[in-house]
Image (tube, helix red, strand yellow):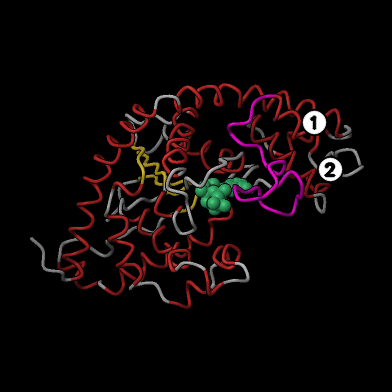
Amino acid sequence: MPFKQRVFSGVQPTGNLHLGNYLGAIVKFVALQETYDCIYCVVDLHAITVWQDPSELPKATREVTAAFLASGIDPKRHIVFNQSQVAEHAELAWVFNCIARLGWLNRMTQFKEKAGKDRENASVGLYAYPTLMAADILTYRATHVPVGEDQKQHLELSRDIAQKFNNDFARSIQAHGYGDAFFPQPEPLIQGPATRVMSLRDGTKKMSKSDASDQSRINLTDDADTIAHKIRRAKTDPDPLPHEEKGLERRPEADNLIGIYAAHAEMSKAEALQKFGGAQFSTFKAALIELMVAKLAPINAEMRRLIADPVYIDSVLADGAARAQVIAADTMKAVKDIIGFVRR
Ligand code: ATP
Ligand code: MG
């Protein structure tokens, strides 16, 4: 049975939304609206896998929502909401905790990186993060998931969970009239020149919300002067830019800045190098700053306008949550029947 094509993705309200989130995820979210029904979620249940200050969390949730809307996501044609308003995510995550194997979760590199050396002290939620992510996607039986490169492994785990559920309950799925498979195999959408935007201070590290240095990232709330300042100070090497992509090998900072330029200009890295091959970084950075400011300033201004109106933002989230829940409740009823839970 073919599954209805649907896009799902999420961003955590953990502060400091940055260029990586924008180019790696949000820009893709916007583009996919033309071809799919889309559900975009502010994943606050994921955020609390590490400590969040209760006085900051609502602000961060509204800021991510504002970034979605300011970037061009249409909350009327599609669905925008925050995860904790639809309890089915947590409910399905429990089922998936009983499907996923410890061995699978033990391989997840994000947990290893985030837990660091003090693993004994990490929350159980941080460890189980990928099963909640599988539940987010599969609550809507979504078929396509736009994410940055760093989430590829979690997407593979979601596919494994969907497959094991379909196999374990194959007879019950058939008996309840759902054919060969209840959950689709969600496909990651990871394409283009900026699937992994790197730190401006170190081209081998992912640009991240949690980096102690604010100079390492462009925040979506940065104004034009701050963007210019950070790009001018961004680490480079002494050589001029190469003419071909092969010349970016072993030059992570050059590779990163060319990728950022290409993504903003909606071209490939090769095309960006046709333009800037042989140029000094000073020339290229001036062009990069001009392009980034032109693209990001209107989003920045619209985000500020929206953040000043929390009542409106909250109404968008409430409306989205109500519509999401209709779909989620249908899935959960079916899952309960398939598993054999007695229900009202
Ligand atoms: P955290 O450090 O709290 O995990 P994060 O910056 O990774 O924060 P998330 O909310 O976890 O942000 O991720 C939201 C989306 O942004 C995901 O699709 C993720 O793959 C993407 N993303 C995050 N960082 C980058 C990056 N540096 N380059 C490209 N995409 C990124
Ligand atoms: Mg992340």
Label 1: which secondary element: helix
Q: Is residue 90 left or right of residue 259?
A: left
Locate the C terminus by quadrant.
Answer: bottom left
Residue 167 coordinates in the image, percent (x, y): 31, 72
Magenta segment boundaries in residue numbering = 199-224
Task: Kindly check if marks 2 and 1 are in contact, taking CB atoms under 8 A apart as contact.
Answer: yes
Residue 171 showing in the rendered view: yes
Residue drawn at 78 percent across, 46 percent down: 253
Residue 300 coordinates in the image, percent (x, y): 56, 26
**Dot 2, crowdedness within 10 Å: few (<14), some or many (≥20)?**
some
Using the rendered view, name the quadrant where residue 79 is placed. top left
Locate the N terminus by quadrant.
Answer: bottom left
Using the rendered view, name the quadrant where residue 23 is placed. top right
As drawn, which residue projects farthest toward the left?
344
Magenta stretch: dominant SS? loop
- The residue under label 1 is which amino acid type? Lys
164 or 295, which is in the foreground? 295
Q: Disc 2 to disc 1, how far (Cα)?
A: 10 Å
The residue singled out by tag 2 in the image is 236
Using the rendered view, name the quadrant where residue 268 is placed. top right
Residue 190 showing in the rendered view: no
Residue at mark 1: C-beta within 8 A of ligand 1: no
**Dot 1, crowdedness within 10 Å: few (<14), some or many (≥20)?**
some
Q: Is residue 287 left or right of residue 121?
A: right
Residue drawn at 74 percent across, 43 percent down: 200
- The residue under label 2 is which amino acid type? Thr
Which label is found at residue 285? 1
Residue 80 coordinates in the image, percent (x, y): 36, 37
Label 2: which secondary element: loop
